[in-house]
Image (spheres, rainbow, N blue to C red):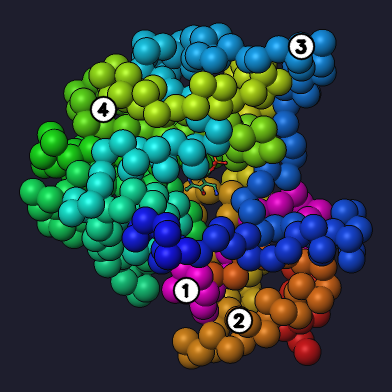
């Protein structure tokens, strides 16, 4: 480790929360209730599945290095030029490369406390300095633990190169609105790149004008980058495809560091097919919203504090008088029953567990296991 560059020396490897391979072996895949990774309980579009099978004859070929067909389809969907899109091996890869390209030693990257974990990782790997801005307070009336855009703006200095925002954010589920974001962008200096991580945007976008997206502002701000993913609303987490949208010049610079064949052929074909099957997306979004509301109500009825969410997960406080001991006990007791949630100690939120909104039957099974645990 002493040979690694300073930013990397202080890092810890990605912690998925639990050893899922061992848990699947113990409980069997059907016996394990996996609500720890914000995956889509309904799976991918049948058209996306068929498109993968259709690629089997071409596995010996390299994929299109530019992913031109998928970019064209995304450009049409978002009303931008294909040259404004870059594909990534998951949006995680793109978030990492943004810091690599735009920030370095003695330069600052600004993000909110409880912002998505990759922001910190990307900053450290780039050898840049993290400026972590306090989140809105836990007892905030509408958006506890959410991004404080005013404080983020105030944290920008001449050393700042990059600001990471997630809207909605993981692990908090919180969001900020369109007007607040438009004002924020109008005040950010043009030299500072603002990354809007919109991994959950398709789940929030149900005619709800509350949740800001960077897309309508791209034409006005050449320093704005939006990242999206096929992992959540499209149910294609296993394929690892994300993309970013930005001004052409910025995309062209990012192209220089992209690995030539970073998105594989079956994944390209499946994502194109998924985009054609809008009804699957809309159906899943509607189910998710219903189930999220029901689950939040059921948890609240059990005396638990549930943070507001526009995603496919909820953050829940299981502590007693802010003592995290009960959260740890509940989590361990649920694991013993084959129920996987995401512990939040790594985020500095040990009182909370993050619960992915499952299907109706999964949520019922969770609540029944939880009742069992809370009773004992
Ligand atoms: N951003 C946020 C806010 C996320 O929650 C996730 C997935 N957990 C990602 C980005 C990365 O997703 P992927 O690499 O699968 O596109």
Q: Could you give the CA–CA distance between mark 2 and mark 1, rounded to whole angstroms? A: 10 Å
Q: Is residue 97 left or right of residue 329?
A: left
The mark nearer the N terminus, 2 or 1, is 2
Is ligand 1 less than 8 Å from the beta carbon at label 4? Answer: no
Instruction: Give the residue displayed 75% in from the left and 49% down from the top.
Output: 359
Is residue 132 in view?
yes
Is residue 229 in view?
no
Q: Could you give the CA–CA distance between mark 3 and mark 1, rounded to whole angstroms? A: 46 Å
Q: Could you give the CA–CA distance between mark 1 and mark 4, rounded to whole angstroms? A: 33 Å
Q: Pointer 2: what residue? A: 327
Q: Could you give the CA–CA distance between mark 2 and mark 3, rounded to whole angstroms? A: 49 Å
The mark nearer the N terminus, 1 or 4, is 4
The mark nearer the N terminus, 2 or 4, is 4
Q: Pointer 1: what residue? A: 349
Q: Could you give the CA–CA distance between mark 3 and mark 4, rounded to whole angstroms? A: 39 Å
Q: Which residues are magenta?
A: 345-366
Q: Is residue 129 magenta?
A: no
* Category of crowding for the residue at label 3, using alpha-carbon neighbours closer than 10 angstroms: few (below 14), some (14–19), many (at least 20): few
What mark, if any, has residue 256 been given in the picture?
A: none
The mark nearer the N terminus, 3 or 1, is 3
Q: Pointer 4: what residue? A: 217
Q: Pointer 3: what residue? A: 58
* Category of crowding for the residue at label 4, using alpha-carbon neighbours closer than 10 angstroms: few (below 14), some (14–19), many (at least 20): some
């Amino acid at each position: 480790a002493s040979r690694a560059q300073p930013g990397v020396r202080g890092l810890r490897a990605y912690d998925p929360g639990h050893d899922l391979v061992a848990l699947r072996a113990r409980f069997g895949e059907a016996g394990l209730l996996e609500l720890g990774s914000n995956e889509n309980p309904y799976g991918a579009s049948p058209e996306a599945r068929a498109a993968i099978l259709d690629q089997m004859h071409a596995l010996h070929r390299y994929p299109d290095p530019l992913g031109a067909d998928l970019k064209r389809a995304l450009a049409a969907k978002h009303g931008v030029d294909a040259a404004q899109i870059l594909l990534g091996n998951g949006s995680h890869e793109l978030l990492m490369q943004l810091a690599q390209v735009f920030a370095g030693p003695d330069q600052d990257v600004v993000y909110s406390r409880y912002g998505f974990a990759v922001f910190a990782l990307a900053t450290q790997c780039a050898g840049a300095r993290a400026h972590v801005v306090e989140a809105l307070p836990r007892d905030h009336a509408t958006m506890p633990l959410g991004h404080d855009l005013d404080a983020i703006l105030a944290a920008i200095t001449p050393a700042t190169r990059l600001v990471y925002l997630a809207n909605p954010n993981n692990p908090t589920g919180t969001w900020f609105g369109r007007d607040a974001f438009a004002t924020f962008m109008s005040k950010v200096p043009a030299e500072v790149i603002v990354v809007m991580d919109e991994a959950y945007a398709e789940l929030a976008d149900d005619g709800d004008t509350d949740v800001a997206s960077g897309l309508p502002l791209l034409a006005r701000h050449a320093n704005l980058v939006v990242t999206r993913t096929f992992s959540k609303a499209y149910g294609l987490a296993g394929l690892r495809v994300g993309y970013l949208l930005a001004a052409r010049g910025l995309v062209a610079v990012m192209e220089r560091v992209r690995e030539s064949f970073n998105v594989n052929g079956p994944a390209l074909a499946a994502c194109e097919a998924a985009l054609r099957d809008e009804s699957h997306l809309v159906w899943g979004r509607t189910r998710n919203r219903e189930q999220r509301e029901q689950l939040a109500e059921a948890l609240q009825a059990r005396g638990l504090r549930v943070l507001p969410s526009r995603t496919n997960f909820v953050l829940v406080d299981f502590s007693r008088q802010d003592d995290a001991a009960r959260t740890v006990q509940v989590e361990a007791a649920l694991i013993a029953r084959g129920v996987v949630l995401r512990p939040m100690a790594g985020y500095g939120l040990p009182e909370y567990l993050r619960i992915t909104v499952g299907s109706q039957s999964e949520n019922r099974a969770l609540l029944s296991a939880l009742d069992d645990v809370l009773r004992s």
